């Protein structure tokens, strides 16, 4: 036997034990890493898998004739995961992407503040062309990747106030709806906001496997966890793009608004708030700067006058007053009142011998009397109690006209306007301290009464329909199933006999067509326009107001025009409204010289904008 | 004694060898896999090249089994000297690959002498230790043994191949088996513990700890304290204290900066997962995400995406961990352990000191590789580049390990012959 063979034989066991201990330690360590510690599984998913959101195409918007008004264009967001950014040649990157070093540092800092592990937007809305310039270098930029987004494109530079705009979600949106993630877009105003849920569609998810160089190397588990995005619904609106564009042209250089509605359906044909702006100004990276300019403009172009402004209605209010008076029986169609200028100022005209004449001549004292009879019906001895009684009835009727409440149009931010009630005057003057004589200004659409232009157009619809209306709306139907909203098919009857509205219609016909009518400039051959002017007094120069519909029988269109600080209703608002009607009914305007005059005119004085709010307590 | 014509090669060892090689090849394929080169036989890829190396290794193994083992024992010193010469040459004409300049380029293939220095040293040491007149009780004997293994270790260290040099520490096991005092093992353990603690703990605390250990030994462990005990203990205390105090100096001045970083990462003193700690962090992610059963063959998300560097060579174990999970990784470790235990058992049945010592050397070299490689990949040891035997991609190491193992299998087959 060789030496040491037996002597140290037991040492074999020691060596084996040492080897075995190492093996056991390894297996124990593996158990810790692979079975008990979940951290590494998460880390592995975080770095090798990327959850991409697949943004659905936002729904398109069409006009009533099927013309495309809003569509999408693909843009790309450059995303960054700060932790993954490694070995970046910053100068090369900045040069390629086109930003300064300082900008780079600032953006990286912002991204890091949000999260080092999650993706945030490094650069927004990169166009196809910009992207093409450096996309081939993207693999060098570890930690960066592109995510496709869509941008709204407005095919014509019109209808900004109706269509609205899309912007990034804010904290409030994120809190309200978990659907949204930071950096998502949401409709901020107009149809984009009102139909956000329909337009946005459903986001899809895609899990891709990326390598250490940040290159996609395929889908994860053959797309087992992927979902496809569902495109947003298209909106088919009631707008007439041609009419909208034409009305906007007419309102150039003016402040005010135009609302045109099809009376038989409540479909809004055009809705203009002037000054107008190109909706494409509020798209993409230029949005921030443009938004600031628009919001600081003294003429408040972002303010949608057609829906948000509550103006004193002026004389157009007399149409509603006369209808209530007739229905209540305090006057009858043949009632005449003297034009007594001592009661309330008026222009020179013969005394009205009937409601029809009163409307035609817009006689202020006539409606002073009418309103007095409505408010003080003589049911109570005390004129104060009597006035409370009368005002309550009057208020109720006015609400039936759609005044003093939000007309539930499918657009956001609609004002109520204001129709004072007894509670209001009791609070303002004190109970038993007011009567007709205190509030008579309301009779001619001044005083505490304010009306939203949409409600004015609706008034024209009511007369056109002889006593009922459909809630004005902008979307006819939407989505692949052509869904409609039930509430827009609901007819609202005022509970005032249609024979009285015939009288109003005849009066309004006379306004345009007879000598002594206040709106002869609105007269068009072959088209029977019925209208009512208003000249609303305010702190500055009078607002010019006109509501009308045409033709007189079987009306196709009702229009309200409001031009701020322009003067008499018959001078500015009426001709503009008549041009809108001519355009809509004839499809073209023959009165080219007339048209040019009003397009180019700039009647509104540059006054600080009056804030249209409820009257403050004196 | 009989001299049978029929050689009996150890089938278990050869089976384990083949199992590990094939499992390795499959994992190299998985680590390099991409859809452009989907064939496992694609010779333009590493898994394809590995087949050639495996074929060469098989031929080499077969040849070695045909050779009379006496040829190796008679030429042990000659082989040793030739390899030493190659190592010296490498120092001058060596090419740098991954930080180590241990490669000689023959144009058609690159060759790493350090891989062959291991079996050459094993042969030479075996020869030396089997000398009839060797007296293992004399320190001089062990000094020469240390010199035989120390010279190639130093030459390799000079090539900046720390990993391969550290493998030579494995010779402590065959030497221990032949009678080297067990204090060497204890000393080794003490040195490692002191080194690690000295880096983690304040010097004064360290000295207090050492003093406490010495006091425990003197007053609790020993019943009677002779003067000699006192002297030994105080001597131990002084040496340990000096060692502890020198650790910081050695750490900062002897080790290279990347080695310091790797140790700091291991000890958790820095967590630089983008820099020095990147490899190990990624390796732990890959292995940890494998879970119990693994993600499946070719389904690793981390290794497929090149997050782990060197994943077909030094970090090949990550692929096993990620795709085969705890079950697969444990299987591989058990395969290695089985191989090591088998070799030790075979060594113990040798009748000559020469082949017993050589068998222990084979087991120890393989053990050191497995220890350093898997220890590194699992984040238990600092990052030291060293292949996993029979498993990592690479021709030099596969051929060298095959020679190392099959010389022993050949010797084992002849164990019953009279020497």
Image (cartoon, grey):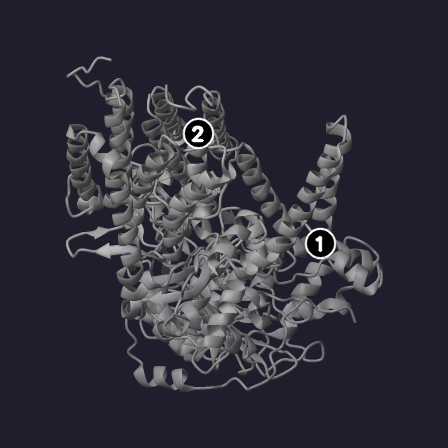
Q: How many other residues sit within 10 Å of disc 1, few (<14), some (14-19) or many (≥20)?
A: some
Using the image as rendered, state which of residue A47 and residue A207 is in the foreground: A47
**Residue B319 position within the rendered picture, expressed as x and y whole percent measured from the top left:** 35, 39
Residue at the location (38% across, 86% down)?
Answer: A597
Query: Mark 2 to mark 1: distance in Å?
Result: 118 Å
Q: Chain of mark 1?
A: A
Residue at the image point whose x is 61% and y is 45% from the top: B194
Which disc is residue A14 wearing? none
The quadrant holding residue B129 is top left
Q: Write down the residue under mark 1.
A: A392
- Secondary element under disc 2, as helix, strand or loop, is loop
Q: Secondary structure at mark 1?
A: helix
**Residue B415, how many percent across, how many down?**
27, 20
Q: Give residue A267's quadrant in the image.
A: bottom left
Which residue is at 66% across, 68% downward? A613
Name the residue that disc number 2 marks: B178
Pair 2/1: label in front: 2
User: Tags 2 and 1 in contact by the CB under 8 Å rule?
Assistant: no
- Quadrant (top left, top right, bottom left, bottom right) of the N terminus of chain A: top left
Q: Is residue A611 above or below residue B80?
A: below
- Which is more toward the observer, A131 or B183? B183
């Amino acid at each position: 036997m060789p030496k040491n063979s037996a002597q140290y034989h037991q040492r074999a066991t020691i060596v084996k034990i040492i080897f075995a201990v190492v093996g056991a330690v390894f297996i124990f360590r593996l158990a810790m890493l692979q079975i008990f510690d979940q951290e590494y599984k998460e880390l592995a998913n975080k770095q090798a898998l990327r959850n991409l959101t697949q943004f659905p195409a936002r729904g398109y918007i069409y006009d009533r004739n099927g013309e495309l008004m809003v569509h999408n264009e693909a843009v790309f967001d450059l995303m960054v995961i700060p932790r993954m950014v490694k070995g970046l040649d910053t100068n090369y990157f900045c040069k390629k992407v086109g930003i300064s070093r300082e900008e780079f540092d600032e953006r990286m800092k912002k991204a890091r503040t949000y999260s080092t592990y999650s993706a945030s937007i490094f650069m927004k809305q990169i166009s196809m062309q910009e992207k093409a310039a450096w996309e081939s270098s993207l693999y060098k930029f570890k930690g960066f990747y592109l995510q496709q987004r869509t941008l709204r494109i407005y095919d014509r530079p019109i209808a900004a106030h109706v269509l609205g705009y899309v912007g990034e979600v804010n904290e409030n949106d994120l809190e309200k709806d978990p659907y949204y993630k930071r950096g998502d877009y949401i409709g901020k105003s107009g149809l984009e906001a009102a139909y956000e849920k329909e337009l946005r569609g459903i986001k899809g998810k895609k899990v891709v496997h990326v390598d250490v160089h940040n290159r996609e190397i395929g889908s994860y588990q053959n797309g087992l966890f992927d979902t496809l995005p569902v495109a947003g619904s298209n909106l088919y609106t009631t707008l007439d793009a041609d009419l909208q564009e034409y009305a906007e042209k007419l309102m150039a250089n003016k402040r005010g608004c135009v609302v045109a509605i099809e009376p038989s359906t409540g479909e809004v044909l055009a809705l203009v708030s002037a000054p107008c702006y190109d909706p494409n100004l509020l798209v993409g990276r230029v949005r921030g700067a443009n938004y600031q300019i628009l919001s600081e403009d003294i003429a408040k172009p972002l303010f949608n006058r057609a829906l948000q402004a509550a103006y004193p209605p002026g004389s157009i209010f007399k149409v509603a007053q006369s209808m209530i008076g007739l229905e209540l029986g305090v006057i009858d169609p043949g009632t005449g009142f003297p034009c007594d200028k001592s009661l309330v100022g008026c222009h020179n005209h013969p005394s009205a011998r009937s409601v029809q004449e009163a409307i035609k001549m817009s006689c202020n004292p006539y409606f002073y009397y009418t309103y007095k009879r409505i408010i003080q019906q003589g049911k109570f001895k005390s004129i104060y109690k009597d006035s409370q009684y009368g005002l309550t009835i009057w208020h109720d009727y006015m609400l039936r006209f759609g005044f003093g409440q939000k007309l539930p149009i499918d657009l956001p931010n609609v004002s109520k306007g204001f129709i004072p009630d007894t509670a209001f005057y009791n609070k303002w003057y004190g109970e038993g301290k007011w009567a007709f004589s205190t509030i008579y200004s309301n009779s001619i659409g001044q005083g505490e009464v304010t009306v939203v232009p949409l409600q004015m157009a609706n008034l024209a619809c009511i007369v056109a329909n002889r006593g009922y209306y459909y809630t004005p709306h902008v979307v006819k139907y939407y989505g692949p199933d052509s869904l409609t909203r039930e509430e827009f098919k609901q007819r609202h009857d005022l509970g005032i006999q249609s024979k009285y509205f015939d009288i109003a219609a005849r009066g309004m016909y006379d306004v345009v067509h007879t000598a002594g009518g206040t709106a002869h400039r609105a007269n068009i051959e072959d088209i029977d326009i019925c209208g009512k002017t208003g000249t609303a007094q305010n702190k500055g120069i009078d607002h010019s107001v006109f509501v009308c519909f045409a033709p007189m029988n079987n009306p196709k269109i009702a229009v309200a025009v409001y031009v701020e600080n322009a003067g008499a209703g018959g001078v500015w608002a009426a001709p503009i409204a008549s041009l809108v009607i001519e355009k809509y009914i004839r499809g073209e305007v023959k009165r080219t010289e007339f048209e040019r005059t009003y397009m180019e005119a700039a009647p509104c004085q540059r006054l600080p904008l009056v804030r249209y709010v409820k009257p403050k307590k004196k | 004694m009989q001299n049978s014509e029929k050689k009996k090669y150890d089938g278990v060892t050869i089976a384990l060898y083949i199992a590990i090689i094939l499992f390795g090849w499959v994992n190299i394929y998985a680590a390099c896999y991409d859809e452009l080169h989907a064939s496992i036989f694609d010779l333009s890829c590493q898994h394809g090249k590995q087949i050639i190396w495996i074929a060469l290794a098989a031929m080499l193994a077969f040849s070695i089994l045909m050779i009379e083992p006496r040829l190796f024992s008679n030429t042990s010193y000659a082989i040793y000297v030739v390899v030493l010469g190659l190592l010296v040459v490498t120092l001058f004409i060596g090419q740098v690959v991954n930080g180590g300049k241990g490669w000689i380029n023959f144009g058609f293939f690159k060759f790493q002498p350090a891989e062959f220095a291991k079996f050459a040293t094993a042969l030479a040491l075996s020869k030396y230790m089997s000398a009839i007149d060797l007296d293992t009780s004399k320190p001089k004997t062990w000094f020469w043994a240390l010199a035989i293994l120390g010279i190639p270790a130093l030459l390799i260290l000079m090539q900046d191949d720390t990993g391969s040099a550290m493998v030579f520490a494995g010779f402590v096991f065959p030497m221990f088996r032949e009678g080297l005092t067990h204090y060497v093992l204890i000393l080794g353990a003490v040195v490692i513990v002191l080194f690690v603690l000295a880096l983690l703990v304040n010097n004064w605390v360290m000295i207090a700890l050492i003093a406490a250990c010495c006091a425990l030994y003197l007053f609790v462990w020993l019943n009677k304290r002779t003067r000699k005990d006192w002297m030994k203990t105080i001597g131990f205390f002084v040496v340990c204290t000096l060692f502890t105090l020198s650790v910081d100096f050695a750490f900062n001045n002897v080790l290279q900066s990347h080695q310091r970083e790797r140790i700091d990462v291991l000890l958790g003193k820095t967590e630089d997962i983008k820099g020095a700690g990147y490899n190990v962090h990624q390796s732990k992610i890959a292995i940890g995400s494998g879970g119990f059963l693994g993600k499946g063959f070719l389904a690793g998300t981390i290794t497929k995406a090149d997050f782990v560097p060197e994943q077909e060579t030094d970090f090949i174990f990550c692929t096993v961990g990620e795709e085969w999970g705890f079950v697969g990784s444990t299987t591989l470790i058990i395969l290695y352990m089985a191989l090591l235990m088998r070799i030790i058992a075979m060594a113990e049945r040798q009748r000559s000191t020469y082949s017993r010592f050589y068998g222990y050397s084979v087991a120890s070299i393989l053990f050191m590789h497995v220890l350093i490689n898997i220890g590194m990949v699992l984040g238990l040891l600092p990052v030291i580049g060293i292949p996993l035997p029979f498993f990592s991609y690479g021709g030099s190491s596969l051929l060298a390990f095959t020679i190392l193992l099959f010389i022993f299998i050949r010797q084992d087959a002849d164990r019953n012959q009279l020497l």
